Amino acid sequence: MLIEIAHVSLILTLMLSLIQFSIPLIGAKHGWINWMKLSDTTAFLQFVLTCFGFFILMRAFIISDFTVKLVALNSHTMKPLIYKITGTWGNHEGSMLLWILILNFYGFLITIFGTRLPAELKCRVLSVQGLISAAFLGFLLFTSNPFARELAPPIDGNGLNPVLQDLGLAFHPPFLYLGYVGLSVTFSFAVAALLQGKIDSSWARWVRPWALSAWMFLTVGIALGSYWAYYELGWGGWWFWDPVENASFMPWLASTALLHSAAVVEKRNTLKSWTILLSILAFSFSLVGTFIVRSGVLTSVHAFASDPSRGVYLLIIVFLFILFALSLYAARFSSIKSVNQFAFFSRESGLVLNNLLLSVAALIVFIGTLWPLIVETLFNEKISVGAPFFELAFTPFIILLALLLPIGIILPWKRGKVANLKSNLLTVAILSVISGSAVWSFQTGGRILAPIGASLSVWIVLGSLFDIVKRIKLFEVTLLNSLKRLTKLPRGDLGRFVAHMGFGLMIFGVSAVSAWEIEDIRVAKLNEPYQVEDYTIQLTQVSEFAKFNYITRQGVILVKIGDDIITTLFPEKRFYPIQITSTTEASIHSNIFRDIYVVLGDNKSQDFWVVRTYIKPFILWIWLGASMIALGGIISLTDRRYRLAMFM
Amino acid sequence: MKHILSSIVLLFFLNLSLLAVEPDEILLDNILENRAREISSELRCLVCRNENIDNSNAELARDLRILVRERLVLGDSDQEVISYVHARYGDFVLLRPKFFGSNMVLWLVGPISFLLGMLLIYFMLFRTGRVNSSDVLVEQLSDKEKKEIAKFFDG
């Protein structure tokens, strides 16, 4: 019964979303305040009802209610409770419901934090949100109803894909969705501004916190996914240029560009029409990403064509939204155009270049991801576009971006002097080149990118530090005075500093691991120690036992340097009988200098086991860097001017 | 009895899955082995979803890895090995599409859009800036604002 009520509540939400789209919009046109005010109520109700539907579905998963088809197909009584809960969104229907829940959560937040917005703008923003909500609720209810009943409930369910039974993977969809659904808000703000035909620097101040939070969540979501791939896939890769990864990376690149261009609008009231276009594009990438992941188009165009209902509906939604927004943009282009006159050496032009590079990077990811589909559709040929393509085509633009970064930070708004730039950055540049050469000489047969990466990393880190040191007058005034200046820095600037440092550290991690990684694959005899670099590796025991819903084979590996025990590692191989699949669980000892990563392989004979050992120098810096990037976003969010824009 | 049966099943499945490069595949010659790894990262495991043969657990990937090493031992250059595999398995096996035919679009989209972007920026943003040599660039005022200012000065 509850299930049916939840189903009805979603149908009600669909109706509410249609009201939210239409009535206030008409009200805004005629200036009828009461009609406009309606959207606050509908946004609130939509959120409450979606919440209700979502939690009823979650309840069905928790109590293993197999009369619900979705639960029967995707859950199992033996599963640990936490994976019953996360299993709610570990399937197509549930994850679309989560998508809509988060969309309506953002709609609700707009009503809370948007009290200072001009009433007209706010109700237009919510109206666009309503339309998005309606389209996706329609998709959910008509093609992927999560509340469909199972007429002949099975005694037990099919279980959840074992790969998804992992904390890292279980919690990364909510973060990702908070990210790319969050971009719907900036999209709605852009469309609302276009509808009004007016945009100024206060618009940017309203939009930027939303873009920042969405971007921050997206960063966390992508980093979680990448860390999951690192420890779960069994050989320590951390980024695969997989279409699913690319689907989240494209909106990330676009929203990164958006943050930077919105800064120009805010400070200089120019570059407005480009910023609007970016807001539209960022969410369009989110929509395309949702389509790529949710339509099944990835496996093959033919698989897509064989069950087209979902994919086609989704494709139509995505296409219409993008088409609608872009046509509106084209129609209103001339009215929002700003006078763009920049001096060549200025912060503005640095940010314009940043935007160009990030956009080109996003475009490359986009075309690389879709190219196999395009070729298959047009020429009926199957081709692959994988990591080697992206590494070659994408990296040069990121290198340029990294080169530009410290210069951009140092350059003042409006107009800078080349001479100042030279005297300020020469030391930093020399140090970067020296450290690059150092990496070059230490390199153990790695790639050419490693020394370049190390130089860039030092360049960015020192460049950012240099800027801050100058701002707080460190070494010029007393230390106490400098610290005082540091606390008085605008939070936005502090956040920028932290995020850029994170980017620098991340580049270092990436280059270090590509240059100095050590791999050892061998058949090891039980209790017979061997050397991998400085480490003595000893497999002491292999045991098999059952746990929760899987059976595992676990190795015990002692890691020593000389006679000192560094750590004991427990790599596992798990077998899930319900799904007849096995997973590999690597065991990792991390510190900031290196990870020791071991994997247990097959049994060759009696006491002989395949053991893989990887020493990955500085790999943790990749996620450390990503965390700092996200942290930078959080710090910026607390900036005074956003608090003012929101609450005062 | 049930217990014994299940442990037999377990052992079977736990042993079933191979994992990427196996110790018996590795060449003794370090340089050749490193070359084999580089080549392997360029070749797709045909039965997998977006995995190269170096990281794949599939039987076919293992066959290809061994094939690559055989060719290397026979004295093929890296390019020759890749061409050999390409000739047998077609375009699908190459993770880096060749710069040829329609794939040229794929390769050129990035550089060309970058160049176009640079030109656009130059003409839209800086061209006017150069003509205008004043140090501070004044924003253009709307008519309304001009009127307001005029009103202000006229008192």
Image: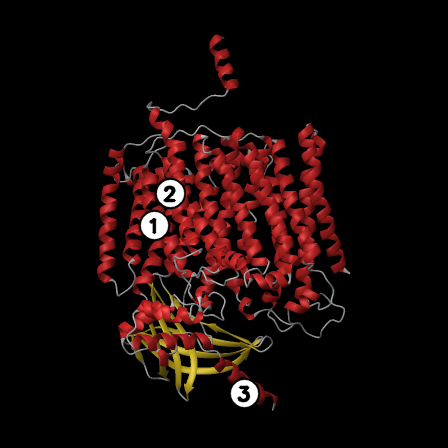
Say which residue appears at 47% left-offset and 37% top-offset: A274
Label for residue B115? 2
Count how many numbered circles sit on residues in the image. 3
> Which mark sits nearer the N-terminus, 3 or 2?
3
The percent position of residue A519, horizontal first and vertical second, equals 33, 71
* Closest to the observer, A317 or A426: A317
Q: Which chain letter matches label 2?
A: B
Instruction: Residue under label 1, please give it.
Output: A399
Q: Are marks 2 and 1 in contact (CB under 8 Å)?
A: no
Q: A621 or A578: nearer the eye?
A: A578
Secondary structure beneath label 2: helix
Query: Which chain is mark 3 on?
Result: B
- Examine the rendered structure and indicate whether residue A549 appears above or below residue B101: below
In which quarter of the view is residue A602 placed?
Answer: bottom left
- Residue drawn at point x = 52 percent, y = 84 percent: B12
Q: Picture coordinates of residue A528 (x, y %)?
A: 33, 84
**What residue is pinned by disc 3?**
B8
Identify which amino acid the numbered label 1 is placed on.
Answer: Ile
Q: Position of residue A175 (x, y in %)?
A: 53, 54
Q: Residues within 10 Å of mark 3 (few under 14, many from 20)?
A: few
